[in-house]
Amino acid sequence: DANMSFYLYRLIDYCNFIFVGQWAQLAPVGGHHFLDTVLSEDCIEHSLMFHRFCGGNRIVLTECKRCNATLFDWYTSLAPNGSRHNQPLQHVLDEARRFFNKTETPDWSLCIQHELRKKINRQRNLALKTEDAIFVKTPTMKIANAPQDFYLYPGQILMAHLQHCKKGVKNGGMFYTVSQIDEDHVVFEGDLILPLDFVAKYMRLSHCLTISSSQGRTLEGIVEIFTKHKRFIMKHLMICLS
């Protein structure tokens, strides 16, 4: 946000910066604020400060290298200057439902609210648990993305949720696959071994993710998108499809 950019700007004479991103992604939670002033959504993109950060250099990638060209054309049409960007959201959603009409069980689900995320995760966890699964009781935490009780079993994919690296676990958002469960420890692929109580506190079920936490991910398989929420906007759809 603008405050973070101010602190980075103080380092401009001492560091070289390379910024990588996509301006059509979601804005910071709460918007851009600086010194009690609400700034426009494109305040960083078009600022002289950002121009100086990058030495006036900008590379824009326009050719699809990661996915199906049809999918690429669909989600880029939702970005600013895209053919669908100024169309009514409901019209675009109706068109998307007709085009993306898979009926198989989804591998992943994306939604806005944590309540729905937890509900779907609980349902999928109960449906997929194996006979040798163990029940994990999680600690009570007063945060939006608090952990929920779940069954743990080999082959399960969990997502890390922590602010700093701990015990070899990267910052929040990384996926880890369970390979073995001992009495008090969990072994993940890559020979990462974590105490069970650490897993209970810092790992989350990943069957359903919030759209905000899905930004920048590649999710293999079929993705289910929940769009019926009053805060759902065109950017959410673009993030989910991309």
Image: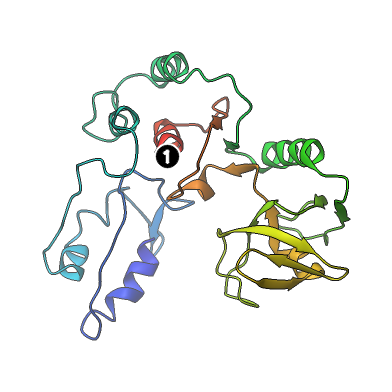
- Residue 186 versus residue 20: which sits nearer the camera? 186
Residue at the spot 42% in from the left edge and 39% down from the top edge: 239
Please identify the quadrant where the C terminus is shown.
top left
Q: Quadrant of residue 235?
A: top left
Q: Mark 1 sits on what residue?
A: 239
Q: Residue furthest left?
A: 56
Q: Nearer the viewer, residue 111 or 187?
A: 187
Asked if residue 44 lies left or right of residue 3, the reply is left
The answer to whether 52 appears left or right of 4 in the picture is left
**Residue 15 in which image quadrant:** bottom left
Residue at the outermost bottom position: 14
Which residue shows up at 60% across the image and 68% down it?
Answer: 190
Which corner quadrant holds the N terminus? bottom left
> Which residue: 49% across, 51% down?
29
The x and y percentages for residue 173 are 55, 58
Q: Amino acid at mark 1?
A: Ile
Q: Residue at x 87, y 57 (%)?
A: 137
Q: Is residue 143 above or below residue 123?
A: below
The spot of residue 180 in percent (x, y) is 76, 62
Q: Position of residue 208 (x, y in %)?
A: 63, 41
Q: Percent position (x, y) of residue 52?
A: 16, 69
Q: Compared to 87, does 192 lie above or below?
A: below
Instruction: Say which of 178 and 211 sits in front.
Output: 178
Question: Within 10 Å of the Cα at label 1, are there few (<14), some (14-19), or many (20+) other Cα atoms?
Answer: many
